[in-house]
């Protein structure tokens, strides 16, 4: 029985002999990637924020129920866009740094919030037909003065027009809005970054290759064995039973051109059905991106090749 032995190169979370290693990004970020990411964050955030500023004005003038729904869906959608934009650019330029992703996403959210204030006040001025030019609003000093005026006097009524939020109550709403945007943006960006592995040897993103579906019988023991680095435990698995609502997917993920970084992920899948007949799928990683040696990668591929596809429950007993 072969035990896991971490390979000496590549981004792994452990270099201790006999301790399983799990893939993590190296943290490297090319200079052009950081520059492009920041540029996308500033410009993209500003444009998205400008659009949100106009939308916010119409929400302020809408009925209370529409205001609440609009803010929930609007902030959620804007947050995802603010995280997605810098993430796509950084990944395109091969940045694999969580810190760079965090920094660019923070700049994206800050740019959007600043632009949202500018264009919200500009839209409000247009609505009131006061005719203040945009450049008179956009400066930090004049913008701060306008925000302070809204902070002191309020702007719109809530609760059946019985209450005008001002002061600390209004500031709390603004803080919740910004940090909700930032949280959603960061979650979106980090999820995007962690979708793929990266091979430092070939300077390329990895690919995921599902190789077999197995029965989830005694999955706690399988999980424990794999977490200990024992690849041989896969040799005893049985094929997935056809039409059964629970099984495990086995995936090899890594470099498409070399064996420098190859990882193993085993995901338990459970399909559930509620009383109304609606189905939902729950996925749980038993082990995620366990780094394998080239020999272990071949071993898993051989096991998969010898395992038949999904079978009926009766047919599996003959295997």
Image (cartoon, rainbow, N blue to C red):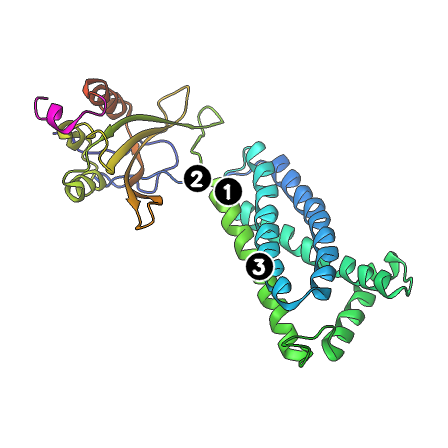
Between disc 3 and disc 2, the foreground one is 3
Q: Which residue is mark 3?
A: 72
Residue at image point 14% right, 41% down: 218
Q: CA gap, disc 2 to disc 1?
A: 7 Å
Verify whether residue 183 appears in magenta: no
Q: Which residue is mark 1?
A: 97
Q: Which residues are magenta?
A: 309-319
Q: For the stretch drawn in magenta, what is the main secondary structure?
A: loop
Q: Which residue is mark 2?
A: 25
Verify whether residue 310 appears in magenta: yes
Residue 296 location in percent, x, y?
A: 24, 26
Q: Residue furthest front?
A: 276
Mark 1 burial class by Cα count in 10 Å: few <14, some 14-19, many 20+? many
Name the element at disc 3.
helix
Between disc 1 and disc 3, the foreground one is 3
Residue 119 location in percent, x, y?
A: 78, 57
Q: CA gap, disc 3 to disc 2?
A: 33 Å
Q: CA gap, disc 1 to disc 3?
A: 30 Å
Residue at image point 47% right, 44% down: 191
Mark 3 burial class by Cα count in 10 Å: few <14, some 14-19, many 20+? few
Q: Are marks 2 and 1 in contact (CB under 8 Å)?
A: yes
């Amino acid at each position: 029985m072969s035990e896991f032995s971490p390979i000496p190169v590549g981004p792994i979370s452990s270099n201790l002999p006999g301790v399983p290693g799990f893939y993590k990004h190296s943290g490297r970020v090319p200079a052009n990637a950081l520059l492009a990411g920041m540029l996308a964050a500033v410009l993209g955030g500003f444009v998205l924020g400008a659009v949100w500023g106009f939308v916010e004005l119409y929400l302020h003038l809408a009925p209370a129920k529409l205001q609440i729904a609009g803010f929930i869906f609007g902030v959620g959608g804007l947050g995802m866009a603010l995280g997605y934009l810098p993430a796509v650019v950084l990944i395109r330029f091969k940045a694999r740094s969580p810190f760079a992703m965090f920094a660019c996403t923070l700049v994206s959210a800050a740019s959007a919030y600043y632009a949202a204030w500018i264009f919200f006040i500009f839209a409000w001025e247009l609505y009131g037909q006061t005719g203040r030019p945009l450049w008179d609003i956009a400066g930090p000093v004049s913008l701060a003065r306008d925000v302070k005026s809204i902070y002191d006097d309020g702007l719109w009524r809530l609760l059946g027009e019985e209450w005008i939020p001002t002061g600390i109550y209004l500031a709390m709403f603004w803080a919740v809005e910004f940090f909700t945007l930032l949280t959603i943006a960061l979650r979106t960006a980090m999820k995007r970054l962690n979708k793929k592995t990266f091979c430092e040897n070939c300077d390329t993103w990895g690919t995921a290759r599902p190789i077999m579906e197995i029965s989830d019988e005694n999955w706690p023991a399988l999980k424990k064995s794999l977490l200990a680095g024992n690849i041989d435990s896969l040799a005893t698995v049985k094929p997935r039973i056809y039409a059964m609502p629970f099984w495990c997917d086995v995936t090899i993920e890594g470099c498409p051109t070399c064996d420098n970084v190859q990882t193993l992920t085993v995901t338990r899948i459970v399909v559930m059905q509620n009383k109304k007949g609606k189905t939902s799928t729950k996925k749980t990683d038993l082990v995620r991106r366990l780094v394998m040696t080239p020999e272990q990668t071949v071993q898993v591929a051989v096991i998969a090749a010898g395992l038949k596809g999904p079978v009926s429950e009766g047919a599996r007993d003959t295997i």
